[in-house]
Every structure is written in structure tokens, then in C-alpha cells.
Amino acid sequence: MSDTYEETIKSRFDDIIKDGPSTNTGLLELTDNMIDWGDAENIIVKYVKSCPLISRPYIELSDDSELGFGDVESIGRFFRLGKTNKKATDTTIGKYGKGGYKAVIAMSDMFELITHIGDKTYTCGTNFRQMERKNTWEPTVPLTSKKNEGHHGSTFKIYFTFNSQSSMTFNMEELKRHIIRGYHDHPKVVQFTFISDDSEDIFAPNNYSPYSENISVKTKYIYPNGKPPATSFL
């Protein structure tokens, strides 16, 4: 038979959306990459409930990594599911290059990446619904570069899927709880800045215990014959 049968882009994306990470888990996947690969010490999370240009919520994650994405090859690999990361070892994350991109696909229609590497600033992005219609893995916003004006780090701009449950249920307090649970005992101190509407919350997960509000002390008595001894009164 000469016909070839390959999974369509839409089919692949549908599987990721249905089975992929939740919004909070997906954002943790991205911050893991920022901390472990980018060696970031400060991460800013900005949440806008309604983008004036496209009338939908978006979330923006930025870090202060001196490395940015490291190199141009890493940018291209991010937009390819399953492309092996040759720099990964048994002790690093991201060997198969799936987690970060799957997280973005699961929660958004559109996505933009900006990263500063050396003297260049690179921008790349995509519209996942257009990719489905064209049945292509190629990002709809091709990679471009310009002179870096002294910036560093990377920024992920994630536009939530318009009709998704995450766009209606997401809140920063719940994300903060997940961040604290994920990094409260991390060997590296990382500062997070949460920005939403007119509020700003700056915190380091290491300063919190995710268990303090749920700890309870109970006393249990064990008796040899299963019954408490008779009380005697003098």
C-alpha cells in the first residue's frame, strides 16, 4: 500500500488538551525549566483577565536567567514535541522536550516566546488553531531576531483558550499554593512576583510550609484487652 497514515496535528493536540497537565501543573512545568535550565533566581507571573486586543485572559511568565534559552537550537526544539535535548543527562529535566510545549498547548490558543541570548533578542510564536487547520508543526509566527538592548531572561506569553475551563477557573491564589508546594524545600531560593490587576505579591516559597494549616495532633490510647481500665475512685 502506498498510502501513509500519520496522526494529524489536531488529533495530537486534542490528546494533549484532554490528557495533558492542568493549568497550575503546566505553569509549574515552565517554572521548573526556568529554574533548572535557566538558573533563574527571580520569576514574574503576570495575569491579565482580559487582553484588550483579543478579549481573553493571558498569563505572562518572565525570568531573569542570564542564559535565556541558551541557543537558537533550543528555541526550535521547544516548538517540536519529542525532539531530544542532547544536553540532557540522567540528572536533568527535559530530555525529550515535551513538558513545556505540552503545557502551553494544553492551556492556550496562542503563544509567544521572547528570549534574550547574548547580543540578540529572539521572538517566536504560534496560533495552535491555525496549525490544526494547516496540519503543520511549523509555528505560525516564524523566528525573528533583533539587537538585544541590554535585556536578559525569557518571557512566555500564554493566551488561554477562549472557551476553556482554565480561563474561567484560574486564580493566582491557587497558583501560589502550587508554587509553594513545589518549591518550599528547593535547595535554591527563588523569588516570585505575582502581578494581577492592581495587586502585587512578592514571596519566596522557601519561607512557607505547605503543611502548616493542615497539621493536627490527635492522641490515641491502646489498651491490651481492647477496653479502657475501670476508673477507681478513692
Image: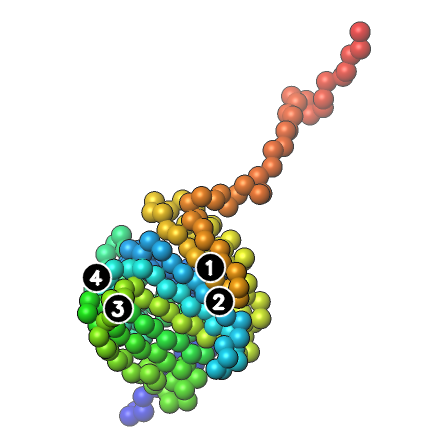
Q: On the rendered structure, is 178 left or right of 84?
A: right
Count up the numbered dots. 4
Q: Nearer the viewer, mark 4 or mark 3?
A: 3
Compute the Cα span from label 4 to label 3. Answer: 19 Å
Q: Nearer the viewer, mark 4 or mark 2?
A: 2
Q: Quadrant of the C terminus?
A: top right
Q: Residues within 10 Å of mark 2 (few under 14, many from 20)?
A: many
Task: Report if the CB atoms under discs 1 and 2 are less than 8 Å apart.
Answer: yes
| Residue type marked 4 | Lys
User: Can you say whether 31 is above or below 49 in the image?
Assistant: above
* Residue 176 x/y as whole percent: 49, 55
Q: In the rendered structure, which disc, 4 or 3, sits on the residue that comes first in sequence?
A: 4
| Residue type marked 3 | His
What residue did someone put label 2 on?
Answer: 47
Q: Residue at x 34, y 84 (%)?
A: 140
Label placed on residue 116: 3
What residue did someone put label 4 on?
Answer: 87
What residue did someone put label 1 on?
Answer: 194
User: Can you say whether 228 is above or below 87 in the image?
Assistant: above
Task: Report if the CB atoms under discs 2 and 3 are less than 8 Å apart.
Answer: no
Compute the Cα span from label 2 to label 3. Answer: 22 Å
Compute the Cα span from label 3 to label 1. Answer: 22 Å
Q: Quadrant of the N terminus?
A: bottom left
User: Can you say whether 223 is above or below 94 in the image?
Assistant: above
Query: Which quadrant of the structure image shows residue 105?
Result: bottom left
Q: Nearer the viewer, mark 4 or mark 1?
A: 1
| Residue type marked 1 | Phe
Q: In the rendered structure, which disc, 4 or 1, sits on the residue that comes first in sequence?
A: 4
Q: In the rendered structure, which disc, 4 or 2, sits on the residue that comes first in sequence?
A: 2
* Residue 83 x/y as whole percent: 27, 71
Mark 4 secondary-structure assignment: loop
Compute the Cα span from label 1 to label 2. Answer: 8 Å
